[in-house]
């Protein structure tokens, strides 16, 4: 008997390798406890997507009966994760007054770390997404590793000491090449002090808390999914531009990570064969034409004032004030950003892109220009809408919320 066409993997599980699949039967059944985790995760996800909901409303959203929902939420209320609000009149005639359920503000919080070349931010995030005890520090990206570790431990200690009870865990969003399975920062071109650092093990030992790490753009994606424009969406991408360019995908209701978290290195997809030399050693990577170093170089070449300080936000402002040079450069830059999105769109047809970092600083104007370029270039089907938006919450806070979201997905089996 074969089950080859059965859905093989439950949420949160990795696919078995060919070797594990034995004779090719490829059967992985879902255990009762895993099913429980999935249902729990889905209910939490529904609360994130829809806000406070009564048991009856949750049952309707999930397509199950109230008894099933109660069986899932009651343990979470008893654990103090969820709390019942004041009763409000029921939607249903003759129904009992409904008590909306939402995240308990008194529940343990989540620790979050944003690690970028030369600077770090740490904070606590409540289950409903509020940021507390934000602490910032700088470090020498080319400096001594022990000095860096002392700084990150001190910064995190300053944040964690403000928690009333031990947080669920610590999530780290880091720039560079990350092995999220093994918790190692493999390489950061702009911060060699971080390269090869097994940061998860180090912080787990020091703080005696679960620690997870992921690529910075993936944390932005999780932040988008949780509180930003990605809320409730099943498929979208986050694109970050700054000193470097990166991205992350949310596909069919799941974060796509690739092998050990190596997916999403969009900055090094090639858009110009034999183009400029990139930091990675290849030529013509998307990053060579759609990140800040390109923008500064072109601003200098065109004779714009203060080319070192050029940003998308500044170009949008100067273009609106009538600067033709700013208008032309912004148009070329947004077109360069659009080319990478075009390739993604033709490959995965995600249809929805949330911009972060410098390009998001250009606001709706920059997003609209990118969108127009994509629409001019793409082979679109009739009635296919492509959405390109910016996350207005702010890059730092979205990444920190996303880093906290990484803890949620590992600790609470939340499906993000
Ligand atoms: Zn490259």
Image: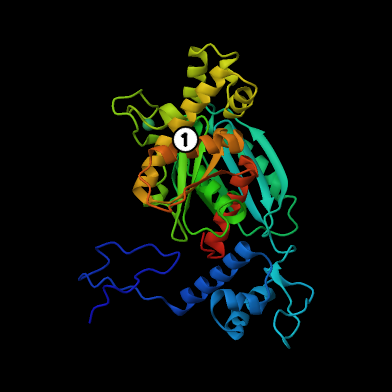
Figure quarter occupied by ligand 1: top left
Q: Is residue 398 above or below residue 267?
A: below
Q: Nearer the viewer, residue 250 or 345?
A: 345
Residue at far front of view: 382
| Residue identifier under label 1 | 245
Residue at far top of view: 303
Q: Nearer the viewer, residue 306 or 161?
A: 306
Residue 117 in the image: state x and y as whole percent.
54, 32
Report the residue at 45% width, 50% height from top.
Answer: 351
Q: Nearer the viewer, residue 181 or 383?
A: 383
254 with respect to 403 (left or right): left
Helix, strand, or loop for circle 1? strand
Q: Is residue 193 shown to the viewer in this render?
A: yes
Q: How is the protein colored in the picture?
A: rainbow
Q: Is residue 54 above or below residue 157?
A: below
Report the residue at 64% width, 43% height from top.
Answer: 392
């Amino acid at each position: 008997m074969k089950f080859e066409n059965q859905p093989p993997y439950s949420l949160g599980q990795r696919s078995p390798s060919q070797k594990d699949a034995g004779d090719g039967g490829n059967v992985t059944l879902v255990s009762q406890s895993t099913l429980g985790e999935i249902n729990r995760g889905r209910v939490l996800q529904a609360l994130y997507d829809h806000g406070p909901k009564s048991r009856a409303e949750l049952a309707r959203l999930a397509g199950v009966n109230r008894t099933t929902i109660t069986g899932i939420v009651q343990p979470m209320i008893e654990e103090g994760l969820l709390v019942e609000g004041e009763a409000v009149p029921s939607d249903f005639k003759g129904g009992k007054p409904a008590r909306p359920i939402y995240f308990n503000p008194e529940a343990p919080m989540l620790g979050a770390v944003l690690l970028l070349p030369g600077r770090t931010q740490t904070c606590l995030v409540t289950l409903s997404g509020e940021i507390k005890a934000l602490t910032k520090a700088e470090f020498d990206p080319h400096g001594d590793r022990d000095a860096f570790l002392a700084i990150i431990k001190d910064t995190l200690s300053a944040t964690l000491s403000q928690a009333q009870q031990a947080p669920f865990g610590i999530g780290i969003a880091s720039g560079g090449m990350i092995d999220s399975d093994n918790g190692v920062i493999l390489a950061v071109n702009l911060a060699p002090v971080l390269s090869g650092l097994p940061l998860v093990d180090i912080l787990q030992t020091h703080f005696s808390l679960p620690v997870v790490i992921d690529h910075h753009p993936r944390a932005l994606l999780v932040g988008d999914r949780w509180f930003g424009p990605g809320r409730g969406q099943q498929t979208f991408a986050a694109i970050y531009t700054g000193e470097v360019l990166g991205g992350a995908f949310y596909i069919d209701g799941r974060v796509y990570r690739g092998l050990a978290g190596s997916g999403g290195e969009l900055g090094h997809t090639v858009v110009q064969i034999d183009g400029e030399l990139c930091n990675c050693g290849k030529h013509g990577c998307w990053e060579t034409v759609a990140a800040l170093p390109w923008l500064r170089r072109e601003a200098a070449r065109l004779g714009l004032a203060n080319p070192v300080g050029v940003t998308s936000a500044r170009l949008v402002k100067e273009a609106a004030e009538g600067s033709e040079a700013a208008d032309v450069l912004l148009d070329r830059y947004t077109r360069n950003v659009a080319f990478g999105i075009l390739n993604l769109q033709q490959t995965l047809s995600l249809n929805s892109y949330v911009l972060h970092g410098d390009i998001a600083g250009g606001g709706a104007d920059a997003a609209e220009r990118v969108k127009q370029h994509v629409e001019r270039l793409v082979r679109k089907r009739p009635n296919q809408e492509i959405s390109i938006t910016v996350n207005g919450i702010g890059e730092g806070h979205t990444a920190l919320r996303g880093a906290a979201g990484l803890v949620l997905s590992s600790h609470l089996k939340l499906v993000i």
